[in-house]
């Protein structure tokens, strides 16, 4: 049964991988011919790699569930009553059929994409010499980086609490190659070892990434290869470094996390968003701070999702929004904060008396580079990691205050480590709305109580709420 199931899944994943190429190629129906026509030209390989990124931005992965909705709902960001359409997921009702289906889709789509990255990598081996050595190295590094991040986020979501007691508990399978067998569930610490191993490989392959010399380019100069433009929408060298900082932070390896974060902080390619971009340019503001974005995706269905979850015209039983008091509390009623005055407004339509979320509302300029953009890693996170990992309190405060100053806020005096942690938690609550990072922060910190999106409420947390059960599609074949 295991072998049959895996063969079916593998066949389906190959179809998904190559579907994006069919409309561009005059192919015969045989898979072999399609494969040969795809991987024997640079254009064909480009389209397959582009297909991986399109899959990454789909609804069940980073185009919605892992950013806009499901994971942020688990973090209790919104005011969700018993009448709300998202009540079951907000109350961690993991045995509810609707919740099970949603979480199963995340898992199956993530592992289908892992299989697709492995198919892509093995096909590059099978058809060598089509790409130049430099481009071949870049593409392999990107695919391996994508594979590492997918596994890591499955570990963060479905794995156990990561601490000294739970780090050896079974977590997720890790796939580095195509196989007829279902891989075992690794202990959580072994899964992180595998993630870091892949990130180390990706870092070496991306050593000559053009971003290191030319920055986040809109177009390469010289060879005219426009496919390599806008490197912050791809798994570039600094995205790999930032992921290493995030992974080591989750593991609790603060020296390694600090070293990786500081390397990203010290480059000049991710400038802080300007007040002109976010406040003066009201018609098409950069609400997602793309100048600071180290890695992001573009979801062409983003504004449909905005209408589904955040539009002011939605009923209270469907809209994702905190209460007016809670939004004010999170942002400390500071209208100088870009994240507050730009992304949260009492709307003029829909009859709402509370602020609704505008971060992913459409903008006037339809040709803007940051339309459809969802950030996955931003520069600010590297500063938060550096602040939390710094042994010197003054240095930690400087890192934290740098972010706050560039969000329109003035410094706040930090005199103790406890106060630093309090301020860091506030910053995570402000910074990552619609980016899916807050739940993982709470889980990493093992917080036993977290605030909700209602005025004053909090909810108690434990390992069973933080650890999403593996879906039946995975467990029934083990």
Image (tube, rainbow, N blue to C red):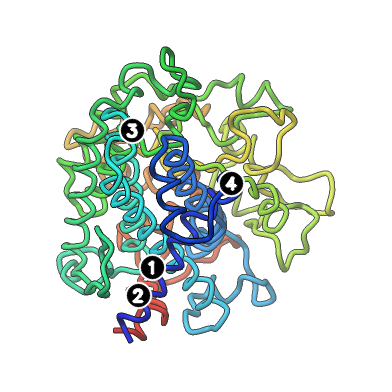
User: Above or below — where is 144 with respect to 83?
Assistant: above
User: Above or below — where is 211 with respect to 115?
Assistant: above
Residue at horizontal 74 percent and vertical 28 percent from the top: 283
**250 horizontally vs 83: left or right:** left
**317 horizontally vs 369: left or right:** right
**Label 3 sits on residue:** 131
**Label 2 sits on residue:** 6
**Label 1 sits on residue:** 10
User: Above or below — where is 104 with respect to 277?
Assistant: below
Task: Kindly check if marks 1 and 3 are in contact, taking CB atoms under 8 A apart as contact.
Answer: no
**Alpha carbons under labels 3 and 4: distance apart:** 28 Å
**Alpha carbons under labels 4 and 2: distance apart:** 29 Å
**Alpha carbons under labels 1 and 3: distance apart:** 26 Å
Q: Which of the 4 quarters of the picture holds residue 473?
A: bottom left
Outermost residue on the top side: it is: 222
Instruction: For residue 421, say whether it is visible.
Output: yes
Task: Point out residue 49 in the picture as x, y percentages from the top left corner.
Answer: 43, 44
* Marking on residue 299: 4
Task: Kindly check if marks 2 and 1 are in contact, taking CB atoms under 8 A apart as contact.
Answer: yes
**Alpha carbons under labels 1 and 4: distance apart:** 25 Å
Q: Mark 1 or mark 4, which is nearer to you?
A: 1
């Amino acid at each position: 049964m295991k072998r049959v199931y895996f063969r079916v899944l593998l066949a389906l994943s190959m179809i998904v991988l190559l579907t994006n190429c069919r409309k561009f190629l005059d192919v015969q129906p045989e898979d072999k011919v399609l494969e040969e026509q795809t991987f024997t030209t640079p254009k064909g390989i480009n389209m397959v790699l582009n297909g991986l990124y399109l899959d990454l931005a789909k609804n069940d992965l980073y185009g919605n569930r892992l950013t806009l909705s499901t994971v942020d709902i688990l973090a209790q960001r919104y005011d969700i009553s018993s009448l709300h359409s998202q009540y079951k997921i907000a109350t961690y009702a993991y045995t509810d059929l609707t919740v099970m289906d949603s979480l199963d889709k995340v898992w199956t789509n993530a592992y289908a994409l892992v299989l697709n990255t492995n198919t892509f990598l093995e096909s590059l081996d099978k058809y060598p010499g089509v790409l130049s050595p430099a481009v071949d190295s870049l593409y392999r590094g990107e695919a391996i980086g994508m594979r590492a991040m997918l596994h890591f986020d499955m570990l963060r979501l479905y794995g156990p609490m990561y601490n000294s007691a739970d780090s050896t508990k079974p977590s997720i399978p890790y796939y580095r190659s195509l196989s007829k067998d279902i891989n075992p569930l690794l202990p959580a610490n072994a899964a992180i070892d595998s993630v870091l191993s892949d990130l180390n490989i990706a870092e070496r392959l991306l050593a000559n990434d053009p971003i290191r010399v030319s920055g986040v380019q809109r177009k390469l100069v010289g060879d005219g290869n426009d496919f390599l433009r806008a490197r912050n929408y791809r798994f570039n060298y600094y995205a790999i470094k930032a992921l290493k900082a995030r992974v080591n932070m989750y593991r609790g390896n603060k020296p390694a996390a600090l070293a990786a974060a500081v390397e990203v902080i010290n480059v000049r390619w991710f400038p802080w968003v300007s007040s002109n971009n976010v406040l003066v340019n009201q018609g098409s503001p950069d609400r997602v701070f793309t100048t600071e974005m180290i890695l992001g995706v573009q979801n062409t269905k983003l504004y449909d999702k905005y209408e589904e979850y955040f539009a002011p015209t939605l009923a209270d039983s469907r809209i994702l929004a905190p209460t007016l008091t809670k939004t004010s509390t999170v942002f400390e009623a500071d209208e100088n904060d870009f994240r507050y005055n730009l992304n949260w407004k009492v709307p003029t339509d829909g009859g709402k008396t509370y602020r609704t979320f505008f971060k992913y509302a459409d903008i006037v300029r339809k040709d803007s580079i940051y339309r459809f953009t969802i950030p996955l890693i931003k520069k600010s996170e590297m500063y938060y990691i550096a602040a939390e990992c710094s042994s010197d309190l003054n240095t930690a405060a400087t890192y934290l205050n740098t972010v706050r100053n560039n969000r329109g806020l003035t410094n706040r005096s930090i005199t103790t480590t406890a106060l630093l942690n309090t301020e860091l938690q506030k910053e995570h609550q402000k910074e990552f709305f619609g980016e899916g990072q807050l739940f993982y922060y709470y889980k990493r910190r093992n917080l036993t109580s977290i605030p909700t999106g209602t005025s004053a409420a909090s909810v108690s947390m434990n390992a069973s709420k933080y650890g999403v059960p593996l879906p039946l599609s995975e467990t029934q074949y083990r």
